[in-house]
């Protein structure tokens, strides 16, 4: 069974997974209101990097001369790989990048940097990896799809280890687009709250090094499923179809009783959170605690699946179900077991759930092995 | 008003990529959304909001307000005539 | 897995299961002609960017919309993803003329083509978009086969859909199924099919 060997998160809340988990459990957020950033006049809520700080940290790792996107991704990958002990230059190791828009901010100044494979090649190339890296670009579910793809690839025996990097940096291109869809909140987002009015954009990179064999105590990757709503390219299904089908598939591999929580998408748009409440209810999961982390990180898009999975793992290792920051009053048609406070648990399994444009949805089961 | 309606139809056809349609194919009072009309969807509404702002200087910040304004070409034209800034 | 059906579309030729399909026009006009001949009643087609039109036209050559099904995956590989449409959207956010277009923005995601194919055909299965440096039969076959780890998936529409301009695109799409029959679904066969473009004499 595939297992996580090591990990890293680089976000406005910190430069390691532990720092990010502590920040979340302490109730901190990277989100604030920006006016005029990227030359956009309409205010937007976002969790954005202090770019100088990131470049300085990267320089400390010898990373320089890359685009900002590539730098953030490399910083996270470098730290996770070092901790893993794997040989990244081995033909047994494959690199998988998860991103939606990569270097899109260079579209006019440096178009050669924009194709996502070019970023993946830079990342794998820095570690002298001989294999062609693959990019999973599946809208907001990319990160989870990358983990599912990695798991399937390792199970097939093609490779022994996978370095899965999810990364997104924000830009005039992305923020203006989400604003044109009336999906962005100027203030902090409020997942599942009655007053929720849109998402916050977020920046982050998150990396997992995964192996076909890992120590007993490691987090194990269970079943994963991807399902399309086949309904609309930007609006979630009114029946939660794809998310429900994903959950139904994953629930064949675990009991409801062993689940500490569902780490949900919770973008804080009216339609997404409503859709998730329907899908959870249809899957008989209304009683299971849920948590949404976008109140702390914003919507980190291609990084979200990996980042939110890592934060959930880190919190469960400390016996805590993280609070859903921004939530206070129920605001969905179907009940959801969401809380503005941290809760305790002894359970060590969860499902990560995501949905995205193009009607796609993904769910994956994670279980921690015995004590180290 | 007739001139405004004709221009508006051309702009809507162009903005929403209504392939093969001419202004004469769109009835002034036919519903733009749902069955029996042009069958436009939620992204089309947002595109029509951009059209109003770009061509007529009208800012429609609340998409919910759009329901009444975008009921038909006639309601759109009436709203534009009353609120246009350019 | 075996290849039940396959198609190849370039700006000047269309081949289905090894036979040339007669089409009028080249580039974007060729895609419109495919719409007229093989789709016909789906005006949403004209709201799509070129990558989605290419993918939806390809899928229409291989199968017709039927009852909703969860066992059909849609996996699209490309080098440029939605880059062609990205440049169209970028024009709507210039300093001088800032009116971001929502209908262009939604097509700036690499996987929308998989969604459009699923929507038209009522396929509720696995959908994924992958970006790789160039056509790579080995990667397409290996990634598609690994999707069979999901026991629900019985067949897949998969292949290469590259779009570098509204008149410049390249598609090899196959319908691969767990059932018996058809060409072998392997890298050698895919490489061979990729070379099968039909040129007008």
Image (cartoon, coloured by chain):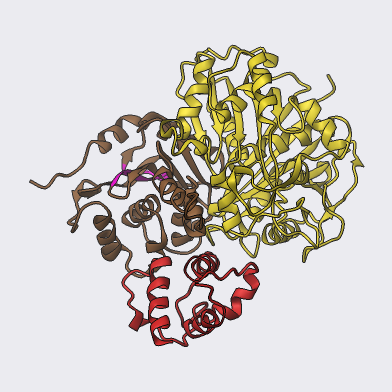
Figure colour of chain A: yellow
- Assess whether residue C170 is covered by the magenta stretch: yes
The relative height of residue B13 versus residue A275 in the rendered view (above or below) is below
Quadrant location, the C terminus of chain A: top right
Foreground of the two, B37 or C119: B37
Direction from residue A334 to residue C144 in the image, left or right: left
Q: Position of residue B44 (x, y in %)?
A: 50, 67
Direction from residue A193 to residue A87 in the image, left or right: left
Q: Position of residue C72 (x, y in %)?
A: 48, 51
Which residue is situated farthest in the front direction here? Answer: B86
Q: Position of residue A45 (x, y in %)?
A: 71, 49
Residue drawn at x 84%, y 61% as measured from the top left: A330
The relative height of residue C81 versus residue B29 in the rendered view (above or below) is above
Q: Position of residue B6 (x, y in %)?
A: 38, 81
Figure colour of chain B: red
Foreground of the two, A271 or A215: A271
Residue drawn at x 64%, y 16% as measured from the top left: A59
Chain identity for the colour brown used in the image: C
């Amino acid at each position: 069974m595939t297992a996580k060997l090591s990990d890293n998160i680089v976000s406005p809340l910190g430069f390691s997974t532990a720092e990010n988990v502590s920040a979340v459990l302490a109730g901190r957020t990277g989100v604030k209101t920006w006016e005029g950033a990227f030359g956009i006049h309409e205010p937007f809520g976002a969790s954005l990097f202090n770019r100088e700080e990131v470049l300085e940290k990267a320089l400390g790792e010898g990373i320089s001369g890359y685009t900002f996107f590539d730098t953030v991704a490399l910083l996270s990958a470098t730290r996770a790989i070092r901790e893993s002990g794997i040989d990244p230059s081995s033909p047994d190791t494959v690199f998988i990048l998860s991103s939606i828009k990569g270097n899109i901010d260079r579209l006019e100044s440096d178009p050669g940097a924009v194709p996502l494979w070019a970023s993946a090649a830079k990342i794998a190339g820095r570690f002298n990896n001989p294999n062609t890296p693959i990019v999973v670009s599946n809208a907001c579910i990319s990160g989870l799809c990358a983990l599912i793809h990695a798991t399937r690839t390792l199970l097939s025996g093609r490779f022994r280890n996978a370095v899965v990097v999810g990364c997104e940096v924000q830009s005039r291109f992305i923020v203006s687009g989400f604003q044109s869809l009336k999906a962005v909140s100027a203030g902090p987002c409020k997942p599942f709250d009655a007053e929720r009015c849109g998402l916050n954009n977020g920046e982050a990179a998150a990396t997992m090094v995964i192996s076909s064999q890992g120590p007993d105590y490691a987090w194990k990757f269970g079943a994963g499923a991807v399902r399309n709503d086949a309904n609309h390219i930007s609006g979630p299904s009114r029946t939660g179809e794809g998310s429900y089908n994903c959950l139904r598939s994953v629930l064949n591999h675990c009991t409801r009783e062993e689940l500490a929580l569902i780490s949900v998408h919770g973008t804080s748009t009216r339609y997404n959170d409503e859709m998730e409440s329907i899908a959870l209810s249809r899957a008989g999961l209304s009683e299971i605690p849920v948590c949404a982390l976008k109140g702390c990180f914003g919507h980190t898009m291609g990084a979200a699946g990996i980042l939110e999975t890592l934060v959930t793992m880190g919190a469960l290792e400390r016996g805590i179900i993280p609070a859903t920051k921004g939530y206070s009053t129920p605001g969905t048609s179907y009940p959801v077991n969401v809380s503005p406070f941290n809760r305790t648990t002894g359970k060590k399994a969860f499902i990560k759930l995501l949905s995205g444009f193009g009607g796609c949805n993904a769910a994956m089961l994670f279980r921690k092995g015995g004590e180290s | 008003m007739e001139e405004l309606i004709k221009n508006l139809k051309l702009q809507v056809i162009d903005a929403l990529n209504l392939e093969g349609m001419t202004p004469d194919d769109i009835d002034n009072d036919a519903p733009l959304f749902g069955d029996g009309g042009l069958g436009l969807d939620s992204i089309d509404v947002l595109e029509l909001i951009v059209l109003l702002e770009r061509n007529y200087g009208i800012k429609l910040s609340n998409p919910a307000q759009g329901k009444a304004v975008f009921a038909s070409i006639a309601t759109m034209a009436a709203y534009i005539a009353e609120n246009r800034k350019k | 897995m075996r290849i039940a059906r396959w198609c190849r579309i370039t700006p000047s030729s269309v081949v289905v299961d090894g036979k040339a399909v007669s089409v009028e026009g080249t580039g974007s006009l060729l895609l419109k002609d495919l719409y007229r001949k093989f789709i016909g009643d789906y005006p949403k087609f004209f709201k799509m960017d070129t990558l989605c039109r290419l993918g939806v036209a390809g899928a229409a050559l291989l199968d017709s919309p039927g009852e909703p099904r969860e066992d059909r995956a849609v996996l699209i590989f490309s080098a440029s993803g939605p880059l062609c449409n990205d440049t169209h959207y970028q024009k709507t956010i210039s300093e001088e003329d800032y009116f971001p277009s929502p209908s262009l923005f939604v097509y700036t995601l690499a996987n929308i083509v998989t969604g459009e194919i699923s929507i038209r055909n009522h396929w509720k299965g696995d959908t994924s978009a992958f970006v790789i440096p160039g056509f790579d039969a080995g990667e397409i076959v290996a990634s598609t086969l690994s999707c069979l780890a999901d026991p629900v998936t019985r067949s897949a529409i998969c292949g290469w859909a590259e779009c570098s301009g509204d008149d410049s695109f390249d598609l090899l799409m196959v319908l691969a199924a767990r059932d018996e029959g058809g060409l072998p679904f392997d890298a050698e066969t895919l490489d061979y099919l990729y070379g099968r473009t039909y040129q007008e004499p």
